[in-house]
Structure formats: structure tokens, C-alpha cells
Amino acid sequence: MGILVTGGAGFIGSHTCIELLNDGNEIIVVDNFSNSNPESLNRVCRITGKSIKIYHLDLLDLESLEEVFLVNQIEAVIHFAGLKAVGESVQDSLKYYKNNIATTIIICELMQKYSVKNLVFSSSATVYGLPDTVPISEGFPLKAINPYGRTKLMIEEILQDLYISDNEWSITILRYFNPIGAHESGMIGEDPSGTPNNLMPYITKVAVGQLNVLNIFGNDYPTIDGTGVRDYIHVVDLAIGHVLALDKTLKSTGVKIYNLGTGKGYSVLEVVSAFESATGVKIPIKITNPRPGDAAICYADPKKAEKELNWKAKKGIIEMCEDSWRWQSRNPDGFKINEESENPRLIYSEDFLIPNN
């Protein structure tokens, strides 16, 4: 029996694949590589010494996706796949509603059809909108303020309705905060297309000389230094959280919701300072206008995950910065590899990619 991982080539997906393989799971990845690179999965195989069956297809392609269910024995699905840029979601909301919600419905329909009723869903702290207080617990009001966050919230509601209609389902919803860092090997990490939307890859792109200056959006928030405060969590801690969530999902039914965060907030300037201390690289900054809809302070109350999943974030901000820099400095162009690279490639066949062992 295998675990189907949608969007497994992405930042969080690829790190979770490592932890799943190290935990002894067989995994099947489905990804359209629209904002990821198959090289990430190649490196997952090199890090773990294990192989992955990888299907290059879009989740909106119902016929091709059904073939994955037909030819594989799937025990559970971890659903990462989806568009995730807040700004783009505002500019092209229909694209986000169609992609994120429709693909989830298609996945759930096929899971229902083939009696695969164990699901871990990748949600987001954006479902909380602009919270009135912190730390944020799972019982806080849900009031997403942008199309991306609303797609996550709508999917959460769909999944809860799905369980009401069929209580054989076991669904775990993970709301995570701000994942940064990279695998300690330096072989995989965050590789965004174009100008990064998130803080850490923006910092590392400046550090490696690909961007001139870090733009900081606002410095007059009611925080320790005027810049926004967020809960930054190491991506490996986050990946381990998915493995523990999967274990619980396979042992029970119902809908379970957990925050995955550290429970501690760092301001933008504190993250910059930590990065400079960890790496010795100076980051030039420029203060610009605040972005509409940005909360001043946002960090998690992770006690429920600690109590019920036996999960707790272990890696601190310095380690997050060190690992981010190790990845970026060794891979300034991300997963792009040239013809002279000694890295083994993934070989395309008609239906899927197989690691070249």
C-alpha cells in the first residue's frame, strides 16, 4: 500500500517525501511541475536511497488521475497541490478558485470511488485572516481576507461536509504558519519562480547576489521594531508533522484540525539579523509601504498538535537561517542543472517518471 502525495515536488511536499520514505512508506507523487522541478524528487531519491513512482499530470485531468488509482494500491492521500501566491490570487481569483477547489473535489471523488478515505490536507494560517489576538488556536474565528485563503477555508468546509455525508472518512487538516529552512544536506530547498513572495527566499536571493535589496513592507506596526511578526517554522519540522498526522489519520476516523507552528513570533528585522549572524552575510534593506491586509503579529498556539500528535517544532531560527543559506549558496539557480551536471536524471516514460538507479 502506498501514500499518494499530490504536489510532492514542491517545497513542503519534497521535504515530506523524505520523511515519509525514511519512515518506511512507499510513495506515489502526482505533480504538474507548474511551480516546481522534477529535479527535487531526483534529489529526494538520492538523499534517501529509495525510489518514487512519479506521475507527471495535472489534477484537473480526471482520466489520467484515475489511472493512478487504478494501477496503484493507495492507502492515503497527502494533498499539497495548489496555487499559493496571495498577490496573484487577488489579481486572478477565478484561476485560484478553479484550480484549488476543483482539484480537491476531483481527488476526493476518486478517493471515494476507490475507497481511499484517509486524507491529510495542506491548509494555511491564512484561514484566520487578521486575528484580534495571539497566539492563534484552532478555535479562533475563520475569516480569510484574500482568494488564496478563502480557497483553503472553502476546502476545509468541503472536507468537513464530506465526513458528515460519509463518516468512514478520516481527514486531518494542517494549518501551517511560515515554513522556511531547507534539508540539512543542502540538496533541496525552496526554489520559487520569479521574485519570491516569501521572506526567507527573498533574503537568500539578496545574499547570493540575484536581488539587490530586501524590500520590507512597513516599519510602523505595533511590534518590537515596527516590522511584521510571524511564526517561522523549519520545513523539516513541518514535514515530520505530516508523517505524525498521517499516522493518526490511519488509526481513526473524523475530521481533525491542527496548527503547525513554533508558538513564537519573529519580526522581519529579527529574521534579517538572525540570518546575518548565522551566515556572516550582510543584507541591504529598503523600507517600503505596508501591504494591504498584512497583520502586524501572527503566531500559532501549537499545543493541540503537541498533545494529540506528539509533535513539537524543534529547530530554532538560527538553524532555519543556516539551512536556508546552505541550500541557496550551493544552488544559486535552484534546481536548474546544466548538461555537465553529474546529478543522475529522472527518465521520462510515457506515463510517469522513474528514478534512474
Image (spheres, rainbow, N blue to C red):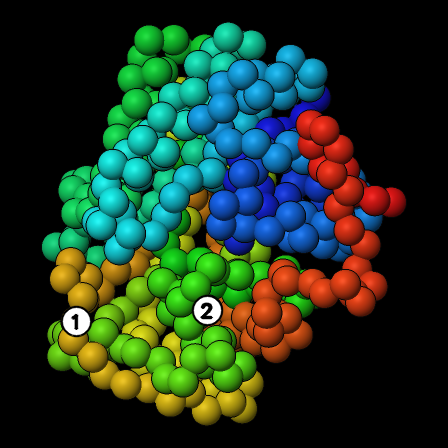
State the residue in front, 331 or 169.
331
**243 up-or-down from 167: above or below:** below
Q: Earlier in the sequence, mark 1 or mark 2?
A: 2
**Marks 1 and 2, how far apart in space?**
19 Å
Residue where numbered disc 1 is placed: 290
| Image-based side of 74 in relation to 153, left or right | right
Secondary structure under tag 1 reads: loop
Q: Residue 103 lies in what quarter of the image?
A: top left
Is any part of residue 27 visible from this angle?
A: no
Residue 241 left/right relative to 14:
left
Q: Where residue 316 appears, x then y in whole percent?
A: 49, 69
Which residue is nearer to you in this view: 311 or 295? 295
Mark 1, other Cα within 10 Å: few <14 / some 14–19 / many ≥20: some
In the image, farthest residue toward the right: 357
Observer-nearest of 96 and 153 = 96
Q: Residue 135, how many percent across, how many down?
A: 25, 56
Q: In percent of the image, x 49 and y 19: which residue is there?
A: 62
Q: Is residue 197 above or below residue 2?
A: below
Residue 87 visible in the current orientation: yes
Give the residue number, with chain letter if any, for mark 2: 201
Q: Quadrant of the N terminus?
A: top right
Image-quadrant location for residue 147: top left
Please identify the quarter of the rendering in which residue 29 is found: top right
Q: Is residue 45 left or right of residue 80?
A: right
Q: Residue at x 65, y 53 (%)?
A: 40
- Tell me if residue 52 comes above or below residue 107 in the rendering: below
What amino acid is at disc 1? Pro
Residue type marked 2: Pro
